[in-house]
Image (spheres, rainbow, N blue to C red):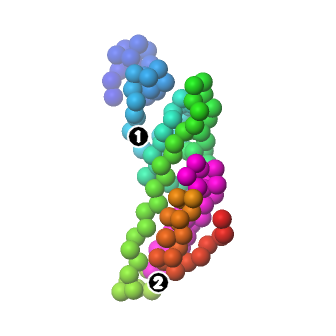
Amino acid sequence: TRSKEEYNGLSERDQLLRELEEGEKDVLIAMRCLDEGIDVPSARRAIILSSSRNPREYVQRRGRVLRRAEGKEKAVIHDFLVVPGISSSVERELRDIERRIIEKEVNRAKEFIDAADNTLDNVQKVEEIEKKLGIILDVF
């Protein structure tokens, strides 16, 4: 990181956020940045690659991007669900653990599908995952 003098008295983080807010930067890449009390209401897109299992945290992550801002009509959130290939050759105990993890992730995704512009696409993708794994979770 650079010294505050190089950023007119701002921390590097604050300088980057200012540049994003003012349109000087289009993208910031950071780990866990939506967990840390960040406030960037002008953000229009987020890509979440590792979601939290803590309901409060994932609601906060989305909420930080979905905040209203002048000139902002909507926000786009890409929240990835990674589904491992559960093979019958894997020990039953490990398969059951993986299945429980996936079930929690799928239920987390379902909580937000109704509010999405692409609800039908998301429902179909989740149903494919459920079918592949032989699980049926809460009905949409």
Which residue lies at the image location 37% right of the left edge and 14% below the top edge? 5
Tag 2, which secondary structure?
Answer: helix
Which quadrant, please, contains the C terminus? bottom right
Magenta highlight: main SS: helix
Mark 1 closeness class: few <14, some 14–19, many ≥20 residues within 10 Å = few
Tag 1, which secondary structure?
Answer: loop
Q: Is residue 57 visible?
A: no
Q: Which of these two is toward me, 68 or 9?
A: 68
Q: Position of residue 81 (x, y in %)?
A: 47, 60
Mark 2 closeness class: few <14, some 14–19, many ≥20 residues within 10 Å = few
Q: Which of the 4 image quadrants contains residue 72? A: top right
**Circle 1 is placed at which residue position?**
30
Q: Is residue 76 visible?
A: yes
Q: Position of residue 106 (x, y in %)?
A: 55, 65
Q: Is residue 23 magenta?
A: no
Q: Is residue 61 left or right of residue 86?
A: right
Q: Earlier in the sequence, mark 1 or mark 2?
A: 1
Residue 132, disc? none
Which residue lies at the image location 63% right of the left edge and 32% below the top edge? 68
Bounds of the magenta span? 95-119
**Circle 2 is placed at which residue position?**
93
Up/down of 64 relative to 134, above or below: above
Q: Which of the 4 image quadrants contains residue 3? A: top left
> In this figure, what is the number of numbered marks?
2
Q: Is residue 105 magenta?
A: yes
Task: Give the amino acid at mark 1.
Answer: Ala
Q: Position of residue 23 (x, y in %)?
A: 44, 23
Which residue lies at the image location 61% right of the left edge and 35% below the top edge? 67
Which residue lies at the image location 48% right of the left edge and 39% below the top edge? 45
Q: Position of residue 86 (x, y in %)?
A: 41, 77
Q: Which of these two is toward me, 82 or 1?
A: 82
